[in-house]
Image (cartoon, rainbow, N blue to C red):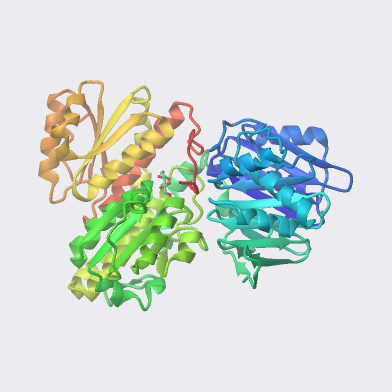
Amino acid sequence: MCGIVGYIGTKNCVPILLEGLKRLEYRGYDSAGIGIINSTECKVIKTKGKVSELEKLVNKENTVSSLGIGHTRWATHGEPSILNAHPHVNEDHTLFLIHNGIIENYASLKKGLQSQGYKFVSETDTEVLAHLIDRYLKLKNNLFQAVRYALNEVEGTYGIAVIYKNEPDKIIAAKKGSPLVIGVGKNENFIASDVNALIAHTSQVVYLEDGEIAEIFQDHFHAKTIADESIIKEIHEVDMSVDEITKGGYPHYMLKEIMEQSESLYNSMRGRLLLKEGISKLGGLQGYEDRIANSERIIISACGTSWHAGLVGEYMLEQYTGIPVEVEYASEFRYRHPVITPKDTVIFISQSGETADTLAAMKEAKKKGALCLGVCNVVGSSIARESQTGVYIHAGPEIGVASTKAFTSQLLVLALITLLIARRKNLNLPDGQEIIQELQTLTSKVETILKLNDVIEKIAGQYVNSKNFLYLGRGYNFPVALEGALKLKEISYIHAEGYPAAEMKHGPIALIDDNMPVVFIAMKDSVYEKVVSNIEEVKARKGRIIAIVNEDDNQIDKLVDHVIRIPKTIQMLQPILSVIPLQLLAYHIAVKKGLNVDQPRNLAKSVTVE
Ligand code: F6R
């Protein structure tokens, strides 16, 4: 999704803005631009395509300024083009605006402005806001107030930064539904849509909340609500280093993030396992344990990969706690008038903590009195802040657009929540201790699987030209089949579908011939024999089979084309292991097709629009 960065201080902002935009590239975008104001000029430089292209243009101009804003745009209104790229400007080129989000009433605002003589050059909703602010500037002669008045007319979502030639000592920033943080430096301040863009300069940040607007100067800032009430903002210390957001010698972030899963899982469980008591310790849930355990129902709501994690969570929670669980796509949940009561606990899972649909679903559940529990990776993100209680997954920054290590850490945290609640219900001490002992063996088992990277790369080589894939699994491994298929389609652009293995005979079996690769997740669990029967059915129709099996399996290799053997663990935790070969398979197929795995086409890391 779009990215925002801004600087005001004593240094030249141009390299700072470019570097910030590069750190936001992972979010997905299709055009980029910067706007600077100094004592002699107001300049906007924009390009379609990558920040590296923008950098070439900027370098030709030799521009220097200590006030500037930069943006990466992910097209919503109007195709990716230089005209539609941000910053957008007022008619006399003195006011620059960058915007994340969507202005829903832009058409009516535009009509009103056109009737007053304003001319538009782009197809965007953002340009409307630039002119609207300009109109109020003419009335109020004060940038802060002009932005505030304009925003009061806007319906929709925004994270914005505005600079103006006649008030060159400030950036105005405002937020509603799109994340925005102020980075507080020494004699310099920053604005960004994501702390990654400013972490190289400062670890002190201020999170703007919905309906807040800030006036940011070189050496101080203040904030108000859009309704003009003064507010005091707290400064937070971010615990993240620049090393964590670099590739660390790997060719892609995605591979790095797959390869660091033993460490990320360790971090997700560190300090949270109490072996003697056979229980997990989750500080974020303290005081809410009984309310969760006594819930009449647990609903899990999320999108994409996080939704797949929610499906595994359903199996875990129902098996161990006996509480009925429902899993809902956040995008459906928010609009279908769901029946939610104060006796429900709703778990919202989101890596970024900024997904617009999940955030809106949370607001809906909150309104209806349910307990809202956030499971997020990004500390201080909107969902983390909006939820009443929650657990961070501590997977570390995930930059690759395709989620990998966040998924396994989400599963791990769901297992910890299950254990905590189950021990308050019927789970006895030895069974709780057994789960903890299994959790403690996970990281070394993950390392064993990661050593299969070369084997999986060779298998991937044989399927680069495939047009379709089926992924089949049962029980706990059905959501893994969905996740394997999603990973493949999003980065390799090969059509892939995940199904519960037994559902195959109700339709998808028609697709099977000697061109159809079928990936089976066939663990030695309670449904193993049934999955073997499904494998036989595919074999009988000459499908090409890749099977993920347990190390001690000696039954399946006779039936299939490729076997990937992974260590065994208890059923609840097996998806954490069985998904890793599927992540590697998708990665290698995409790389062999020459595709950009970290920034796949049309995708964004954090989907902050509906
Ligand atoms: C897939 C992927 C997406 C996200 C989805 C939700 O690899 O990354 O499907 O899982 O957009 O994002 P979060 O978890 O940030 O809410």
Q: Give the residue drawn at x 34%, y 50%.
A: 307
**Which residue is most to the front?**
115
Q: Residue at x 13, y 51 (%)?
A: 526
Residue 482 drawn at (x, y percent)? 29, 42
Residue 24 visible here: no
Relative to 514, residue 57 above or below: below
Picture coordinates of residue 119 (x, y %)? Answer: 71, 35
Horizontal and vertical percent for residue 491?
43, 35
- Residue 383 place in picture, x, y as percent: 46, 60
Picture quarter containing residue 235? bottom right
Residue lying farthest to the right in this orientation = 40
Can residue 468 be seen here? The reply is yes
Does residue 217 appear left or right of residue 277 in this picture? right
Work out whether 297 lies above or below 423: above
Q: How many marks?
A: 0
Pick the residue in front: 503 or 291: 291
Q: Residue at x 19, y 49 (%)?
A: 475
Q: Nearer the viewer, residue 342 or 266?
A: 342
Q: Nearer the viewer, residue 355 or 134?
A: 134
Q: Nearer the viewer, residue 264 or 125?
A: 125
Is 436 placed left or right of 169 in the picture? Answer: left
Tell me: 528 left or right of 274: left
Q: Answer above or below: position of 206 versus 35.
A: below
Going by the image, does 136 lie left or right of 558?
A: right
Q: Residue at x 80, y 44 (%)?
A: 94
